[in-house]
Every structure is written in structure tokens, then in C-alpha cells.
Image (cartoon, rainbow, N blue to C red):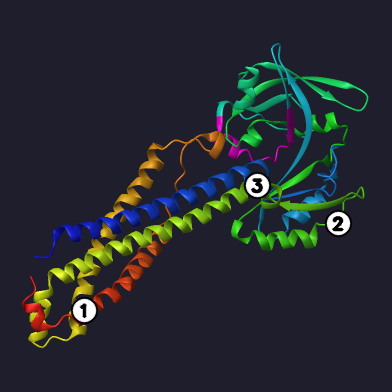
Amino acid sequence: MVSRPAIRIATVGVAIGLAVMIVTVSVVLGFKHTIRDKVVGFGGHVQVHHVLLFSDVDPYSIYVNDSLLDVIRQIPGVNHVERYSVTQGLLKTDEDFLGVAFKGVGPEFNATFLKEHLVEGEIPQFSDSTSHYQLLMSKMIANKLQLKTGDKVFSYFIGDNDVRTRRFTVCGIYQTNMTRFDESLCFTDLYAVNRLNGWEPEDCTGIGATIDDLDKLPETEEAFVNNINHSHDDKGNMITSNTIYESYPQVFMWLELLDINVWIILALMVCVAGFTMISGLLIIILERTQMIGILKALGARNKTIRHTFLWFSVFIIGQGMLWGNVIGIGIVLLQQYTGIISLDPQTYYVSQAPMELNIPLVLLLDAVTLLICIFVLIAPSYLISHIHPAKSMRYE
């Protein structure tokens, strides 16, 4: 009888290796897509703004009329366009104060992302023609200032020669765990921010555009470069565009580093599966030396015997892959439905480990694992060719 421990060790090695690979790929996909969607939710895939916006502390605006919006809407792949204006100010309570950025948005603003992360209150009805001075702030800001929905808070805006005061009502509180946004960004009406900046109704800090397919962002970016970059608005301001990758390079560089970790883990797990299968096959061959000698004495060719042992190894690999898929996919589904694995949102931008199950990738991992395991077994199987019938009869 073939050694059961050898078969079990080989099966467990393949199962563990494949399960770890499935979980690793699912975690990285979940991280990349979750973080990317959060960044897009705050500004779109492409932003159009004044060419000098990031070169000076003074706010720069562009003149946004229907003709400019139409040009952007007609770019292939663009599915939504929205205006926004930004100003800086101080939120002050009786006990504390905090400097924040006020992002003014109009009625076309897509609030789906903020609704998904709303923890208290409601999303204000944003306007570009009037302002109710309603404020949507993050939970981080609300906690620092000890505010809750319905509270009134004074805001101070410092201009060239004066200080203006406005009283806002906290209408809603959101939490995305994206620290760089949550710690400093509040949402209010486009009209209010334009008035505070001393701009005309058609002036805006920029335009945010979202696209249908992120994989086609390079083509869309090229269209923006050809149609928008270094052109002038109706006031003569030179405008340009940036993608989310250019606007937030640190975030996406961090995500790219995860890919390196994935390749390292995949390589290690394939090695684990391969080595356990090699060990298992060698043990099986050594235990069946007498049987191999008898088969050779009866006229069986080396090739036929090697194929027999390789097919038996494929059966063991198949068992290991079956259990690996069950364990790996089970862990992913368990995390998706229960969120049992928690993370520090200050470090990872999420409170639970995001996992995304991609069936085509799982099938690809299965196929690659099977092929590599079979390939590494070909060389050890040639040990059968060195077994002589006469000597094997005396092998104990």
C-alpha cells in the first residue's frame, strides 16, 4: 500500500499553497479597487483646472460655461461631469478650532459615494444659485470639534483685507477612513464657496469627470490632452487636466508595492506545492520499488511506468487543489459577509480587510499550479529508469 502520510503531506502542501494564493490575490484586488474607488469618489477619474492651481497658495479659477462642459462630455468614455470650487477656512467651537477645506459642489454632484459612507444625518441638497449653509463633514472632524448633526458651527474665512464669518449647520457626517481627505474636507454649496472666493457664478476651481472603463483611462487621458490641455477658457485662463494617478501618486505607488508582495507570495506558495509533490512522488517510488522491478521484468517500459506514477501524482494534486479552492474561496466569502478580519484604518484606509473574489483569476491560478506541479515532477519520475529488476527484487 502506498504511504498514506506521504499522500496526505503532498495533498496538504498543494491545498495550503493554493488557498494562500487565492486569499492573497483576493486581498490585493480588494485593496486596489476599494482604495481606488474612494479616491475617485472624492474627485473623479480626471480633473480639469487652471494650469497654475498647484503652483501658488492663491486660489485660481476657470470659467466653466456650457461650451466647455460640452467639450468634456463629448470626450469618448466620459459618463459624468461635475463642477467644484474649493476654499480654506476655520471651523470654531467654544472649545476648539480646526482649519479645513470647504469643497463647494453643485446640483449635478454625484453623491452616491458619500451616501455609501454616511454614518449620521443626510446629504444636503447642494445648489449653485443659493446657499442654505449646510455642511457635510467627516466623522474625524466632527469628533475633533465634538459636533453632531444639527449643530451650528461658525466658520472664519481670511481674505486679503478682511475676515468673513459664516454660520453653518452640520447636516451630515461621513466616514471613508481615507485620512488625507477625512481630516480636512467638508462639502457645502458651490454658490457659498464662490461667494467666499469672490468669484462669479460661472467660475469654479475645476471640473471632475468620471469615465466608464478605468482600463481605458490612458486613451481618455490622451483625448483630454488633445482637447483640453493648454487651451483657454472664455476669460483667457489656460486650463489643463490631471488623472487620479497624477493627483494622488503616493496612494497608487503604495498600491503598486502590493503587487510585488503578491508575486513573492505566489512564487513561495508554488515552491511549497512543488516541493511537497516532489517529496511525495519520491517516497511513493521508493516504496513501490519492488513493484516497479516486477513490472519491468514482465516487459513494462520505463515510459509506461513513469506515466502511471505521474497520473497518480495528478490525482493527488487534484485532491489538493480541490481542498485549496474550498478553503481559499471559503475564507474570501467569510470575510466578505462577516468582515471578521479587521484592520487599522489609520494605516490601511479601511477598517476591514477587503477581499474581491475573481473567478477567472482563481481558474488561472488552478491551471498554473497544476501545470507547474506536473512539470517539476517530470525530472524526479526518471528515477524509475534507474531501477533494475534484479536489484529491486531484493529491495526491502
Task: Indicate the amino acid at tag 1.
Answer: Arg
| Mark 2 and mark 1: Cα distance apart in space | 70 Å
Assess disc 3: are there few (<14), some (14-19) or many (≥20) residues with their C-alpha within 10 Å of its C-alpha: few
Number of the front mark, 2 or 3? 3
**Residue shown at 76% from the left, 27% from the top:** 131
Q: Nearer the viewer, residue 43 or 19?
A: 19
Q: Position of residue 69 (x, y in %)?
A: 77, 50
Residue 61: quarter of image:
top right
**Residue 207 vs residue 293, the one in the foreground:** 293
Q: Earlier in the sequence, mark 1 or mark 3?
A: 3
Residue at point 81%, 44% (across, down): 54
Nearer-N-terminus badge (2/3): 2
Instruction: Check residue 250 in the rendering and tell me which mark sits there, or answer none.
Output: 3
Say if the magenta span includes residue 101.
yes
Q: Are marks 1 and 3 in contact (CB under 8 Å)?
A: no
Which residue is more in the foreground, 26 or 228?
26
| Quadrant placement of the C terminus | bottom left
Q: Are marks 2 and 1 in contact (CB under 8 Å)?
A: no
Q: Report whether 242 appears left or right of 180.
A: right
Neighbour class for label 1 at 10 Å: few (<14), some, many (≥20)? many
* Secondary structure at numbered mark 1: helix
- Quarter of the picture holding the N terminus: bottom left
Q: Which residue is mark 1?
A: 306
Q: Residues within 10 Å of mark 2 (few under 14, many from 20)?
A: some
From which residue to which does the magenta span run?
A: 100-118
Say which label, 2 or 1, has the lower sequence index: 2
Residue 178 in percent (x, y) is at 60, 37
Q: Is residue 213 visible?
A: no
Say which residue appears at 44% left-offset and 46% top-offset: 355
Pointer 2: what residue?
231
